[in-house]
Amino acid sequence: MKNLAILGSTGSIGRSTLDIVESYPERFRVLTLAAGKNLESAYEQARRWHPRVMSMATEGDAAELRSRLRRDGIKEIEVSHGSPGTVQVATHPEVDFVVSAIVGVAGLEATYEAVKSGKSVGLANKESMVAAGELLTAEAQRHNKPLLPIDSEHNAVHQCLRGGRMEEVESIWLTASGGPFLNTPRSAFASITVQQALNHPTWKMGQRITIDSATLMNKGFEVIEACRLFGVPPERVKVIVHPQSTIHSMVEFVDGSILAQFSVTDMRLPILYALTYPERIASSLRFPVMDLRHLDFTPPDMEKFPCLRLAYEAAREGGSKPIALNAADEVAVAAFLDGSIRFDQIPETIEQVLGETESRKPESINEILLTDAEARTAAKKRVQYLSRSKSPLPWTASAIHHGE
């Protein structure tokens, strides 16, 4: 029986993980949960799973959850909140495996503390590896514990690497769908609307990751994550556009052999792989091989999608640059969504912040968070400058939400 802590239990990865637990009750037990701000879902999860500890984002939500559970006669669940609560969930002494699925740097401290306390960690949080991958991998090596990728591309690489030794690897290939603007001319990027950018051709995801996919920044983050997870330099991590999204990743070996991984596009499969590694256990998740028709591959256009170029540059420099890249992107994407800047000004904002970021190597989580805060401040100043130069755009996220 493996005791699980799930960080981000009410999000899509968290819910998929709980589906896995439901399917394999003899193998997994939910021990602790960090639920963030979704009080209603957290309440239902607490009633269903009876975790030892449940953490909410705010003190108010924690008090409300505690009150509801007591009215139901459930007094054995300890309810905590904030960053200390998330750390408590991740480092509980009886936890064997931590699923890190909190979006953004909010989950960074708890993920690091889980690794530091000797837990095995399944990573569905790119931002943790982008901002603090050097610290996380060093700590995992010190404890001889795996950092197991849950996102589909890196999980696919991990599976392909079982076919050879790392010293036999020539290149890692990450596939990209190309997003909604693969065939849109660059000259049209200034007029791209939020609604167009949120219309991803393959995946249904949260707003930030959908915009990151449209700019190819998401693939840039994956390049940085691959460098750190698998210990390879950026020039050996290749991106290839594959609109069908059938092949999740490939590994090319020095003799010219290439192993590719494809499977059903269901996040339960990489989650199950991470939870049971190094075993493989039977599941009902099947890919319809007979449905395969054709597979297209093209190189990415880094002039048209400069975010990918910026990510490679940050990966080569390391240290503070990937931290600033992630922070500036989050601010710029939020500004695009609320109509403050144009789509083509997202990479412009990020490049400006990277140029202003002093190159240094943070030695602690606190230093990383300080660098993150400095980059966000710089990005917000750039956004303010850009937004003052024009009228607010009519295609804001709030307008879309209200059907305008």
Image: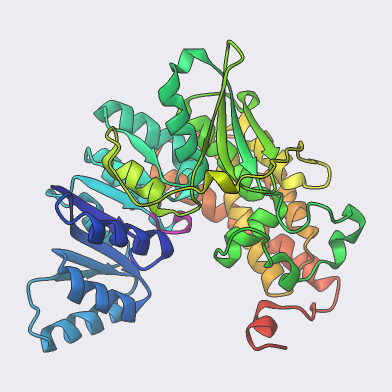
Q: State the residue in front, 356 or 37.
A: 37
What residue is rendered at 80% in x and 41% in y? Answer: 301
What residue is rendered at 30% in x and 81% in y? Answer: 60
Spot the residue most to the front.
Answer: 290
Residue 232 is left or right of residue 159, and the answer is: right
Q: Which residues are magenta?
A: 101-105
Quarter of the figure that contains the C terminus: bottom right
Where is residue 249? Give x, y as percent. 56, 36
Q: State the residue in front, 264 or 70.
A: 264
Give the colour scheme of this rendering: rainbow
Vertical side of 184 occupied by 133: above or below: above
Spot the residue most to the top.
Answer: 255
Where is residue 145? Give x, y as percent. 27, 32
Q: How many marks?
A: 0
Residue 32 is left or right of residue 358, and the answer is: left
Q: Is residue 103 magenta?
A: yes
How would you classify the magenta stretch by its main secondary structure? loop
Residue 282 figure quarter: top left
Vertical side of 124 occupied by 382: above or below: below
Q: Is residue 288 magenta?
A: no
Question: Is there any visible trace of residue 378 in the rendered image?
Answer: no
Question: Is there any visible trace of residue 259 in the rendered image?
Answer: yes
What residue is rendered at 86% in x and 74% in y? Answer: 390
Q: State the residue in front, 189 or 282.
A: 282
Where is residue 366? Give x, y as percent. 40, 47
Where is residue 220? Give x, y as percent. 63, 42
Q: State the residue in front, 382 or 290.
A: 290
Vertical side of 151 occupied by 10: above or below: below
